[in-house]
Amino acid sequence: MKSLLPFSLLLTICLLASPAFAQQDFSKVEIKVHKVAGNVYMLEGAGGNIGVSVGNDGVLIIDDQYAPLSDKIRAALKSINPGPLKFVINTHFHGDHTGGNPNFGKEAPIIAHDNVRRRLTGELQPDTGSAQPMAKEGLPVISYAQSVSVHFNGEELKVIHFPRGHTDGDSVIFFAGSNVVHMGDDFFAGKFPFVDLSSGGSVQGLEKNIAEVIKRLPADVKIIPGHGPISSLDDLKAYHAMLVETIDVVRKQMAAGKSLDDIRKGGLPDKFKDWGTGFIKPDRWIETIHKSLSAK
């Protein structure tokens, strides 16, 4: 039976193997600005999508991609609103979402779940090895166990921790007035997700968390995924249905005594073909589900 790749190698694949992440020459990366709704914009570049709140209070960003892109991100922010950066929120600790922390942390306080800070300091290490701590300037200075509210630009941003999904430090941000939600990497729009099992993630937990988020959302909500285009509630429901059905496929075959190799060879139903066109291919997704279901 093959084991999952070590955390560091798999994370490198996550950051580099897809066209969305593969820009090693950051000078060629273009930061694209998309209006979402209300006070909220989305920046698309290399790495996780950045959520932006703009208004009379200034600017707040959710995630900050890679450090070499910080100047380009600043320029994109100034094109939307010339006000000062007031807050940075991290949806989780992965480097394609927090790489700019040491730069932006000099300008504004960083807010994140307790486990994000613990992983960025190196206090909490992945199961498969050690990770280098982030520079002090890039560490969250405000952390929380369950949730925190930021009252900014005329609306409440509810930052809520959803445990054991993509990682053990995931947060989803709900913009109460603009009717927008930023999902971080709990949501890979239209693709199989990367679930970081070595850092507290769980396929079953992710499915449960998405179901819970769906219950909270109105029909006309706009959704910023961790990766992919601005999405709708129907897109998120389709993603959840994929999680439920693919987990069930693997679970039933495990219950029938089939090995991981046999399940991989059998693959997934053809209806999920397009979901496997991202950097997580069907055999990797099957393997991730199998390991997650096998964990005690």
Image: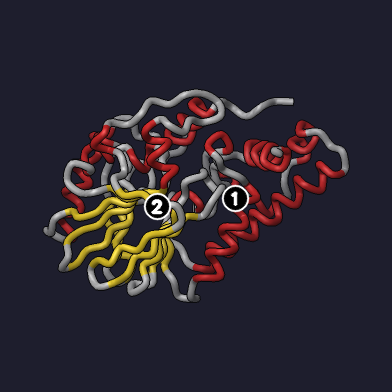
286 and 172: which is toward the camera:
172
Q: Is residue 177 visible?
A: yes
> Percent position (x, y) of residue 165?
55, 49
Residue type beneath disc 1:
Asp
Quadrant in which the C terminus is drawn: top right
Residue type beneath disc 2:
Tyr
Q: Residues within 10 Å of mark 2 (few under 14, many from 20)?
A: some
Calculate the distance from the C-alpha at mark 1 to the C-alpha at mark 2: 37 Å
Q: Residue furthest left?
A: 82
Give the secondary structure at mark 1: helix
- Camera-side mark, 1 or 2: 2
Residue 186's place in the image compared with 118, above or below, is: below
Q: Residues within 10 Å of mark 1 (few under 14, many from 20)?
A: few
Residue 144: assigned label:
2
Quadrant in which the N terminus is drawn: top right
> Percent position (x, y) of residue 19?
42, 39
283 and 10: which is toward the camera:
10
Q: Are marks 1 and 2 in contact (CB under 8 Å)?
A: no
- The figure's colour scheme reads secondary structure
> Percent position (x, y) of residue 44?
33, 50
Give the secondary structure at mark 2: strand
The residue depicted at 53 percent of the width and 43 percent of the height is 278
Report whether 293 appears left or right of 220.
right
The residue depicted at 43 percent of the width and 63 percent of the height is 223
The residue depicted at 52 percent of the width and 29 percent of the height is 7
256 and 158: which is toward the camera:
158
Residue 149's place in the image compared with 1, above or below, is: below
Which residue carries the number 1 mark? 274
Looking at marks 1 and 2 on the same chain, the residue that comes earlier in the sequence is marked by 2
